Image: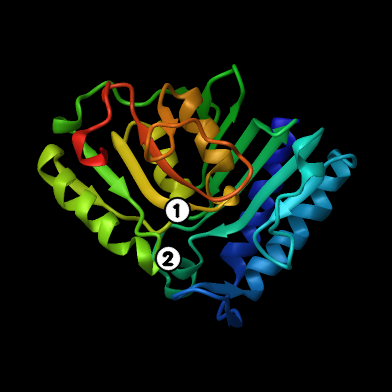
Amino acid sequence: MIDTIIEIAKQAGDIMLDASHPKIMEKSGHANFCTETDERIQAFLIEELSGICPEASFLGEEDGQDVFTSKMSKGLCFVIDPIDGTSNFIYLYRPSVISIALLRDGKPYMGVVYNPFDDLVISAVIGEGTYVNGERTFSSDAPLSDSLAVFGTAPYYTELRDRTFEIAKELLPLCVDLRRSGTAAWDLCCVAMGRCALFFEMRLQLWDYAAAALIAREAGCTVTDIDGNELTYTGPTSALCLSRGVTKIPECFG
């Protein structure tokens, strides 16, 4: 099934690449946007994924399908983000990615994140490792002091701004430098691929992290909430991802 999901993600990526000047809608929260391309890709993903797994339920960011229900904790459930990094997409700032997770009884089972601008597929099946375009990959074993760190600003939640930048200020001298891409799914995958050693964000939605958290874990990362607790995969959470080389949570998260 994972190969079919990858092909569907690639087709959705073609929709993203072909889009030009999409209509923009604003949702609740600071600078929280949706475009007609988000909605088109989500509709495409639901139609195609339903064809390969008709018994599955769906949780998606757009079109009012964004509430986790008790039904989704049983059996199979696809969790999709048609464009993670919509602001990037609107402003032509790369990357933006497509994220597809398959939960089984409320736990991550498969994950696919596709960056169509670089034609990179990062995928994982639980217990089978992480792959980039079909090649096995692992997170870095370098220490944080020799690595980049990446973070998200939780821009829709202004009450988290001060704490986010307090952590970032304390984290900066512990690593080579900080980065922010504008897409949490991609940031988690960058830790999984060994490009960065640490990622954090104070609040993510399930569709932001469901696929990429599995991908990171299968690449040898430790993925928890900001306090070191196991992720629940039922809704919003903070997130902290450490590569193999970061063996303990830095004190700035305490």
* As drawn, 158 above or below 72: below
- Check residue 203 in the rendering and tell me which mark sits there, or answer none: 1
Q: Amino acid at mark 1?
A: Arg
Give the x, y percent position of residue 113: 56, 43
Depth check: 22 or 225 in front? Answer: 225
Does residue 129 sit above or below 204 in this rendering? Answer: above
Residue 248's spot in the image, x, y percent? 27, 24
Q: Earlier in the sequence, mark 2 or mark 1?
A: 2
Q: Is residue 108 above or below residue 49?
A: above
Report crowding for label 1: few under 14, some 14 to 19, many 20 or more residues within 10 A (C-alpha): many
> Which quarter of the rendering shows the N terminus?
top right
Residue pictured at 49% horizontal, 52% vertical: 204
In this view, the residue in front, 63 or 119, is 63
For mark 1, give the secondary structure: strand
Mark drawn on residue 157:
2
Element under disc 2: loop
Residue 180 seen in the current view: yes
Asked if marks 2 and 1 touch (Cβ < 8 Å), the reply is yes
* Residue positioned most to the top: 127
Q: x, y percentage for residue 136?
A: 48, 22
Q: Position of residue 77 (x, y in %)?
A: 76, 41
Position of 23 with respect to 43 (left or right) is left
> Residue at the location (45% across, 32% down)?
229
Report if residue 118 is visible in the image: no
> Which quadrant of the structure image shows residue 30?
bottom left
Q: How many marks?
A: 2
- Please, what is the three-letter code of the amino acid marked with disc 2? Tyr
Mark 2, other Cα within 10 Å: few <14 / some 14–19 / many ≥20: few
Position of 236 with respect to 40 (left or right) is left
Marks 2 and 1 sit apart, C-alpha to C-alpha, by 8 Å
Please state, as top left, top right, bottom left or bottom right, where the C terminus lies in the image: top left
